[in-house]
Amino acid sequence: MCMRMSRLTRIDFPGRSWKAEVGLVYLPDDIFDDMSSLTVLHLGTQLALPRLPSFKGLENLKLFAVSGALSLTELPSFDNLGRLERLVIAIAPLIEILPDFSAVTNLKSFITMDRGTWCCNGFLGQCDLTNPLCGIHPLWGTPAATCVPANRTASAATLKVAARFTESICGGLVGPNMQPDPTEDTMALCNGILYHECQLPGFPQAICYNARFMGIACTPSPFPIEMRRRQIRQGAGESCNPKYEAWLGCK
C-alpha cells in the first residue's frame, strides 16, 4: 500500500482473502498516531509480524490483546497507555521483555497464555532456564531462551504489576490440540452460552469459551476453566450465572 495508513478511516479488500498462515508482515510506525478514539485493539494470528507500531497515539486504549504472534519479538512502549485496563498476551513465544508499566495505572486484568520467556529468563529477577517456559517450545519449535543482561530487566513498576497478577500470567505451555479452532459440532454443544460445562470424549472437563474472539465452542483447554474460576473467586470480570457456572464455583 502506498497511501498513508494513518489517514485511513476504512479499508476493504473485495474479492480477497487473508492467508492465516502469513497475515500481516508490516505496519507503518505512525498508523496509530491519530487514533486517540480507539479503545480496543486486538491483533490476532499475525504469524509473520515481527514488530508493532508505536502506541503513542492510543491514550484512550482500554484493552490490548495480541495472540498468535509467533514472530513478534517486543512490544511498543506503554508510556501513553494511561487508561489501559485489560492486557492479554497469548502465544507470543519470542517476547523476551515487557515495556515499563509506570504509566499504566488503571490495569484491572493481565492475562498471558503459552510461553513467555520473560517469566524465567531473569527479566523478573532470577533466571531459571530449566523452566519449561524457557525451553524449546513443544508445539512451535521456538528455540530455548537465554538469560537477559542486567540492563534489560524489569522496572520497579513492571515488577509490581507482575506480582499483582501472578495467578493469571506465566502459566503453562500450549500443547498440540490444547485449544483447537471451533467447529460446527463443538459450537453446537454450547448453544451460544459462555462458561457452560460441556462434554468431550477423552477429557475430564471442558468449557464453552470463545477463544481468540472466535465462536463460543466446547474446548478442553484448562486455561479458560482456571481463569473463570479465579474470576468468580475474586469477584472479577462479568457477574457469573449459577445456572451455568455452578461447576466453576458460582453461587
Image (cartoon, rainbow, N blue to C red):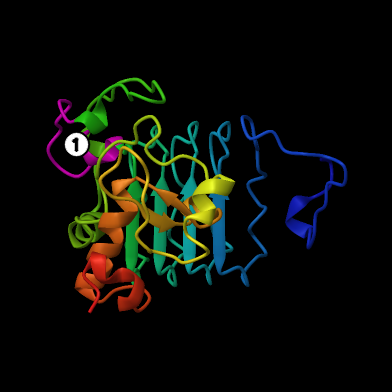
| Dominant secondary structure (helix, strand or loop) of the stretch shown in magenta | loop
Q: In this view, does 110 lie above or below 52?
A: below
- In the figure, is residue 84 to the left or right of 202? right
Q: What stretch is highlighted in magenta?
A: 117-131
Residue at 61%, 30% in the rendered image:
21
| Residue assigned mark 1 | 122
**Does the magenta-highlighted stretch encompass residue 247?**
no
Mark 1 neighbour class, 10 Å CA radius: few under 14, some 14 to 19, many 20 or more = many
Q: What residue type is labelled 1?
A: Gly
Q: Where is residue 238 in the image (x, y as percent from the top left)?
A: 38, 76
- In the figure, is residue 172 to the left or right of 206? left
**Extreme-right residue of the structure:** 15
Q: Is residue 164 above or below residue 136?
A: below
The answer, for residue 207, to whether it is visible in the render is yes
Residue at 35%, 40% in the rendered image:
201
Quadrant showing the N terminus: top right
**Does the magenta-highlighted stretch encompass residue 127?**
yes
Q: Is residue 249 above or below residue 158?
A: below
Please tell me whether mark 1 sits on a helix, a strand or a loop. loop
Q: In which quarter of the image is residue 58?
A: bottom right
